[in-house]
Amino acid sequence: MNYRRKTEIWKTVDWWTILLYVILIVAGWFSICGASYEFDNVGLFDPSGRPGSQLIWMGLSFGLIFVILMLESEFYDVFAYLIYAAIIVLLIATIFLAPNIKGSHSWLVLGPIRLQPAEFAKFATALAVAKVMNTYGFKLTTPKNFILVLTLIFLPMVCILLQQETGSALVYLAFFLMLYREGMSGYILLAGVCAVIFFVTSMKFSDVTVGATALGELLVSSMILLITVILVQVERKDTRAVQIMLAATAVAFLGGYVASFFVPVDYSWISMGLVLLIACYLIFLSVRNWVWHYVLIAVFALGSLAFMYSVDYVFTDILEPHQQVRIKVSLGLEDDPSGAGYNVNQSKIAIGSGGLSGKGFLNGTQTKLKYVPEQDTDFIFCTVGEEQGFVGASIVLLLFAVLILRLIALAERQSSTFNRVYGYSVASIFFFHLVINIGMVTGLTPVIGIPLPFFSYGGSSLWGFTILLFIFLRLDASRRER
């Protein structure tokens, strides 16, 4: 890059996004101070304390930003695969070399410094996926290409799962939001959303019966029926097929209701039997009319039914005991205020105690008395709620919303597939972290240990998000360089 282009970068880079970044990391530092500062111990700027240590990482981040922006934008395209391969090797090495820290092997200890490679794997994966999808003639709808992209996404995810770091691994599901923007079938995204809804419903009502009816199975199978009918209507506008399905549903339920006066009837079996009949009918329509959308809908219905029956096996035989307890507590199936539910209960108390305007900087009683575990990392948002109140917490959420919307706007204006795919990957990752972390702290989602970008304490987290963001800003700046 010549001298003129080195100076031009400061004119073409998106300063609004940089301003949001600075505001968020500064607000994050004040939150870390509120969560970890002790009046009778080290000072705010003492490097031996967490606020001082985070300040050092913040200073180093600006040096890292300078390096990222000074590199040629083509560097990230040319070396995308090499960066990805290096990170994968590092993730595999971490499985065997990292010590056991709180049940996971995800931290490499280098003297006084601890690094978590999983935080850096996000931008490496985004680069590799963008590189593949920027290939000439690439079409995501081709099975071979789709499998290749999924392999790039799931490989680091599996490595991180082997490190016993479930939360960091689940972040890679955010890439499906980007894939949907780039042409992935909506059926896949719908299947993912439905899987979550079906899992929660099955677990929530697994032991509930109404008369002879298993309520959980009835609700899930009824939702499958409803979604199936809607999909047929949306895809082909085939009112006759929809009318037949609705009539069959009405007859089945009315017949079951009448029969229940004479013999106990399990409505869930009627509903599930109807799903099977409708699936067979859709396959018949598909073969007769050569409309393959009907087959896809039938596969969705049958797969959903099979998934419903697999929920119990997945929950009891695949998930770890502590994960089972967290899910049960989140769904209200168990009350464990001194165990798995302790973090969330204390977090909600801290947020609620902040009221409208909060208790003020360094005045949070819950945080000062260390009632909330991990209050300067995964549960940092409770410090924001207690010290800054509803107003401060809302402002933080608004800043994140503006950042994500800004990233989407920047991604949409890219002329290069590489830049656009990477930009949407960045926006998706930030969105996933924000939703899951806030949901976790407020008790809406299970506790899976995922940091809040720019707020949670940690050099690896801060650097990982900084690299992720500023590579995209460098790519965006090159859009107007040439």
Image (tube, grey):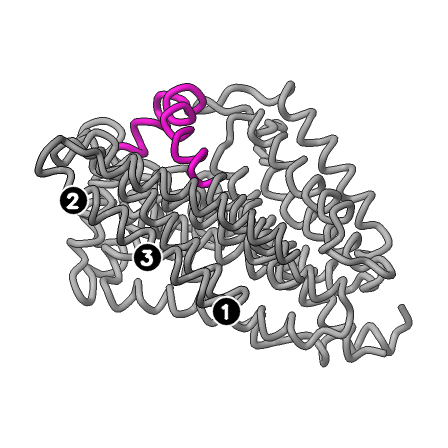
Q: For the magenta stretch, what is the residue range?
A: 304-328
Q: Name the secondary structure under disc 1.
A: loop
Badge number at residue 247:
3
| Rendered location of residue 427, percent (x, y) | 56, 61
Task: Give the main secondary structure, helix, strand or loop, of the magenta stretch.
Answer: helix
What is the C-alpha distance between the residues marked 1 and 3?
17 Å
Q: Is residue 197 magenta?
A: no
Which of the marked residues, 1 or 3, is nearer the chain's N terminus?
A: 1
Q: Amino acid at mark 3?
A: Ala
Q: Amino acid at mark 1?
A: Lys
Q: Residue furthest right?
A: 2
Q: Residues within 10 Å of mark 3 (few under 14, many from 20)?
A: few
**Left or right of 364, for residue 295:** right
Residue 400, quarter of picture = bottom left
For label 1, the residue is 237
Badge number at residue 257:
2
Q: Amino acid at mark 2?
A: Tyr
Question: Which quadrant holds the C terminus?
Answer: bottom right
What is the C-alpha distance between the residues marked 2 and 1?
31 Å
Q: Residues within 10 Å of mark 2 (few under 14, many from 20)?
A: some
Which of the marked residues, 2 or 1, is nearer the chain's N terminus?
A: 1
- In this view of the protein, which residue sits in the foreground, 155 or 470? 155
Compared with 287, 408 (above or below) is below
Residue 429, quarter of picture = bottom right
Q: Nearer the viewer, mark 1 or mark 3?
A: 3
Compared with 8, 242 (above or below) is above
